[in-house]
Amino acid sequence: MRFVLSVALLALGALPAALPAANDTHPFGVRDLVAFDRLAEPRVSPDGRWIVFTVSALDLDANKRRSDLWLVGTDGAGRRPLTRNDAADSNGTWSPDGRTIYFLSTRSGSSQVWKLSLDGGEAQPVTSLPLDVGSFLLSPDGTKLALSMEVFPGTTPAETRKRMDEDAARKATGKVYDKLFFRHWDTWADGRRSHVFVVPVSGGDPVDLMKAMDADSPSKPFGGSEEYAFTPDGKAIVFGARDVGREEAWSTNFDLFVAPIDGSAAPRNLTAANKAWDAYPAFSPDGKTLAYAAMKRPGYEADRFRIVLRAWPDGTDRVLTEGWDRSAGDLVWSPDGKEIFGTTDDVGNHALFAVNVSTGKVRTVVGKGHVVAPQTHGGRVVYLLDSMNGPAELHSVRADGGDTKRLTGINDARLASIRMGEPEQFSFKGANGDTVYGWIVKPVDFDPARKYPVAFLIHGGPQGSWADNFHYRWNPQTYAGRGYAAVMVDFHGSTGYGQAFTDAINGDWGGKPFEDLQKGLDAALQKYPWMDGSRVAALGASYGGYMINWIAGNWPDRFTSLVVHDGNLDERFAYFATEELWFPEWEHGGTPWENPQGYEKHNPVDFVKNWKTPTLVIHGAKDYRVVDTGGFASFTALQRMGIPSKFLYFPDENHWVLKPANSILWHDTVLDWLDLWTGRVDKD
């Protein structure tokens, strides 16, 4: 693999040192994809005049991305970088007076909280703790930090560091486990837990609010500061955690807890009555109401998140969005406390919505594209918006949906040098006669008189969506730039079309979704006659990878080639190899010994005898969700049957391919494979 990585790095080096002239354009490709600057974490200043946000940029030499803080006015003026260094600066947070920005930085060699005065001067360290800080919040009065660190429960950060150093010095490398998880996502467990601490900004010993809890907050692997919040008086923290003991690997019972910041009392469970997922606490501006998101069905990670309001501190709950058939996220209050804004998947988009706190009435504020990270100020909402036509930039909209403004154009110069394909949404009658939606992206430099090969992309999840989104791993523009028509179908099980549509995949992985894919491809070929139905390749990852294995045995004559990334071959064995057991137990109706038929109903391994399509198999060694033995098994079967096949293996990637060089190698290998079997290149 050392040689392969070197080749990919050389390919990275081919990126232009300077942007080409506007009239010197080229079709979009993976080298453009990895080179875009990526915006995240917008935070509006207390006076509503400024936005601090994070921009990550490609670091060619390090084969990774580095991040800096930027500033722009809420009117779009005055854009400038605040930090420039080789470290990772992120999570910019305003002080109450708006004169200081606190942020996370690795510039000391460890992830710690720093601060930067807008009056001038160099950034200064705020914390110098023995462990990395994973996330943080500033208290309402600006005197305290709530932050997360990974500790061995019952120990201080210093004691945890000492134990970690002692473990690293041991000659014996074996590890003993007595419960699940022994590994999760891409990390082997070592007994540490992510705990919420409180420490004075002026310095002092951090107080572990979860000292006795064998649970994580924020949740692993993706949780952040959105999972905890200071109470309005600043005297306590509300945080989310799954404190279920040995049931952790098969439970989705996250609860909200409240604990005093001085650690004088044990955390109190606020949502014990609900055995499903409770998360994302957000207090109203007047401090009288706690909003949070809640599911109803235990064990189901794709249930609908409803917005729940609780009169604070000890009032009753009121479900605000029971009548709204969408799942709410990114919750933020309006400054006057009359509405809650958030985002949701909605018919092939990820929309910005507002819900009236009194009536529960929901209205769409921004309905097209992919909206994330809303922030309110005055009568406006700031947010990040991307689409299939380009990466995220900051935007602002009036709270009533009018007067939309684009505030940044950090990637505009690079976009001007690139030619992309035109996206278009379509619909058709799928399984059960239901209306099913999909997207196509036309090839770059589209000519309706030509016939184009097709890349048929199948999303994962399976409860996901091909939203109008500029994706950094599965971006249809990379296929359009190579001369393919990209076709994507939001089959039964996809999100954004109502909970019943999402639930329709449960226990039916190879049924209605498979029918939708068949009908959706036929519908696209009929609607767009410039697509060449004799030259279609199918590609998918995660559930999409499962579906590719299912297609190989149940639709073997349709495609010129297949690409399966991180896909299960045998659903029964996959149960025993994965880590989050609640997922297969829900999807297949129990454990394999309780309901073996649920795992055999649509099991790709039972149809390997029908395989005949040339297939590229890809897998990451650190994927503990869909374990690499699934990829080994698929490739073994293909080779033993004499079917043309290749295996691309990443020893340093998880369920995703994240390193820039690996992303380039992935795309080059996949597109070369498609070219070979769609006849775009000579097989000799």
Image (spheres, helix red, strand yellow):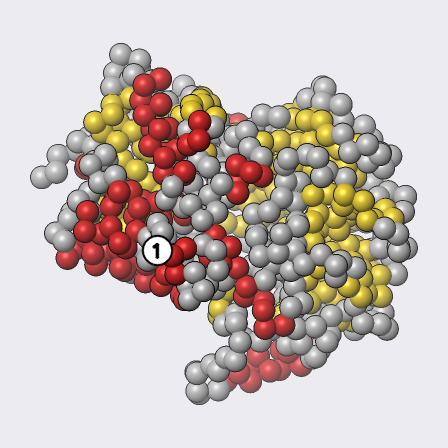
> Farthest residue toward the top?
449
Position of residue 665 in the picture relative to residue 509 (left or right): left
Residue drawn at 48 percent across, 26 percent down: 435
| Quadrant (top left, top right, bottom left, bottom right) of the N terminus | bottom left
Work out whether residue 448 can be spotted: yes
Q: Nearer the viewer, residue 154 or 266?
A: 266
On the image, the x and y values in percent for residue 26 come to 36, 26
Q: Is residue 626 above or below residue 52?
A: below
Q: Is residue 18 above or below residue 311?
A: above
Work out whether residue 650 can be spotted: no
Residue drawn at 65 percent across, 55 percent down: 276
- Reading the image, the residue beneath label 1 is 600
Q: Is residue 193 above or below residue 365?
A: below
On the image, the x and y values in percent for residue 494 come to 49, 38
Q: In terms of image quadrants, where is residue 19?
A: top left
> Farthest residue toward the bottom?
171
On the image, the x and y values in percent for residue 53 come to 66, 42
On the image, the x and y values in percent for residue 12 come to 36, 45
Q: Nearer the viewer, residue 336 or 600?
A: 600
Q: Nearer the viewer, residue 55 or 439?
A: 439
- Give, as a three-letter code, the residue at label 1: Glu
| Quadrant (top left, top right, bottom left, bottom right) of the C terminus | top left
